[in-house]
Image (tube, helix red, strand yellow):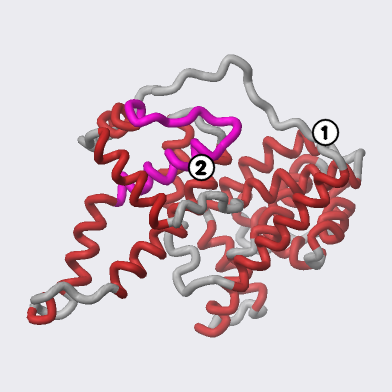
Amino acid sequence: MAKRFLSSPRHKISYKFREASFDLLTDFLINLNKRNKDNIQSLSECSGTFKKKKLMEYIFLITKEMRLDPLAGYHAIELLQRFMVKHLTDLFTTPTPQGAAADPPRSYEGAVFDKLKEKFPLIIFSCVQLASKMSLHSHMIDTSTAVRFLHSVGLSVSKKAVLDSELLVLKGLEFRLNSPNPLTYVEILLEVLGHNEPSTPVDRLYPLCHHVLQFVSLQRTAIYDSLLAITVQWGSPSTEHREKFVTVTEDYMLLGGSVIAVATFILYVRKYEQVVEELSHITGISPKSIRDFACVTLKHIVGASSPVTFT
């Protein structure tokens, strides 16, 4: 991609478990659970539209190249999804420009998408840049670094263009940048799991959870399609089934718990059932739902031709 633009931090930052108090963990868990439920109850028709594999892969590559905390990448994906839905909604609900009605059908929509296509790579980068400023463990991408990086990947932009794009995203998000993301749920659930079950090696599970979560994110469509097939008992999902299933694809509590379950099965299969039961107790999600998600994910990881089963 591009050469490295940010030097490594002087001290490698690692996530330390079992240092948060019970009261703090309780507050975090209650807050995340509430925000997860609020998000599920207010889903739009466009939920997940900007979480396609190529988009997420592009953001993960930028995050890696810029040596940012992985949390910044997942945060950027959430910012991009929220911004693009709001931005497109605003564009298509504003009055049609004078004279456009006389143009051929869809000309206005086509013009909007053509203009957006030019700005889209910079909008994606702006989301990563904003996410870097919200992360406690990341370098903050300044404007000069942003311009050098963008030039290196073939985007000739000025500092003003970078600032304008960042401001466009900020205004579109109404300056609300604190969006929960899947990795946050994984980290908090691991922390609570380590507190409730001290024998669980959460420190060793955490690095593997990163890989599992990234795999699920990049294989999102295939994994959720398989999970939907299980839900409808391997029949052909109807449009109504797919519409209702969106609440599952956007349930980060389920995703976080299932990622931990998969990591546990890979590293400590004997503890798998115990961890699933404890995760169910923590999240309020049924053990079956967590097992089904873990089973589907493991199937895709190993490339099995038939469902993975646990005995």
The segment highlighted magenta reads 120-145
Where is residue 176 shown, x and y percent of the image? 51, 53
**Secondary structure category for the residue under label 2:** helix
Q: Which mark is residue 19?
A: 1
Q: Residue furthest top?
A: 10
- 262 to 221, vertically: above or below: above
- The residue depicted at 91 percent of the width and 39 percent of the height is 198
User: Mark 2 highlights which residue?
Assistant: 73
Q: Quadrant of the C terminus?
A: bottom right
Main SS, magenta region, reads helix
- Mark 1 / mark 2, whichever is N-terminal: 1
Magenta includes 142? Answer: yes
Q: Quadrant of the N terminus?
A: top left
- The residue depicted at 85 percent of the width and 42 percent of the height is 194
Residue 191, quarter of the rendered image: top right
Magenta includes 10? Answer: no
